[in-house]
Amino acid sequence: MISESCGEVVKTTFGNHMAYVFDSEDNPKEREYLLTKEKRTEVIKYYYKDEVDNERNIEFTYFPKTNTLNFGPDEFEETKNAVFKIESIVNIEFKRFHSTSDATDVTEPIFFNEDYGVLAIGNVMAPTVVLLPYKSDLKTAQEIYKMIYE
């Protein structure tokens, strides 16, 4: 983990994360991502850089005051009473966020924790992604994948 501060911006780079990309529950693709978290007064940005293909980079913006999350053009808000823990990632509570859009093909849910970042991105029209610490096991990723569609 590397941290640097530029006035009001604190930038932290974390070790690699393993993304499990599910087209179905069987045989997800594995991709390595490097997470950089940029914390400012009003906003926290999470950059997931694909180690091989920059077109697969992922970016989220979290607004702590309103407890909203932006991913692409969409805004997400917390689903009330949807806090949970994953046993293999101890002492971290994740919140479930849903899109504020009325579209039927929207990305959701997103599992998120302000300190950890994004745990999972659900999507009915595209692959679902589970982001775990590097060298996590497939079994944990599959358990989280199942939680997305409960």
Image (cartoon, grey):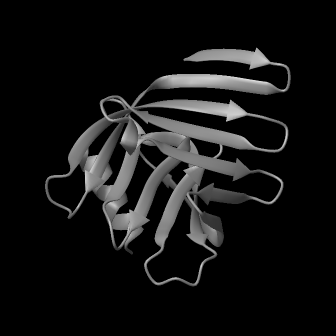
70, above or below 15, in the image: below
93, above or below 53, in the image: below
Number of dots carrying numbers: 0
Snapshot quadrant of residue 18:
top left
Which residue sits furthest front?
55
Position of the N terminus, as image quadrant, is: top right
Percent across and percent down for residue 30 are 24, 41
Which residue sits furthest left?
27
Percent across and percent down for residue 131 are 40, 44
Asked whether, in this view, residue 27 is left or right of residue 133, the answer is left
Percent across and percent down for residue 34 are 44, 29
Asked whether, in this view, residue 64 is left or right of residue 122, the answer is right
Snapshot quadrant of residue 100:
bottom right
Residue drawn 48% across the image and 69% down it:
108
Residue drawn 69% across the image and 15% down it:
4
Snapshot quadrant of residue 44:
top right
Percent across and percent down for residue 55 are 38, 42
Say whether residue 8 is visible.
yes
Say whether residue 137 is visible.
no
Residue drawn 48% across the image and 37% down it:
48
Position of the C terminus, as image quadrant, is: bottom left
Q: Nearer the viewer, residue 138 or 91?
A: 138
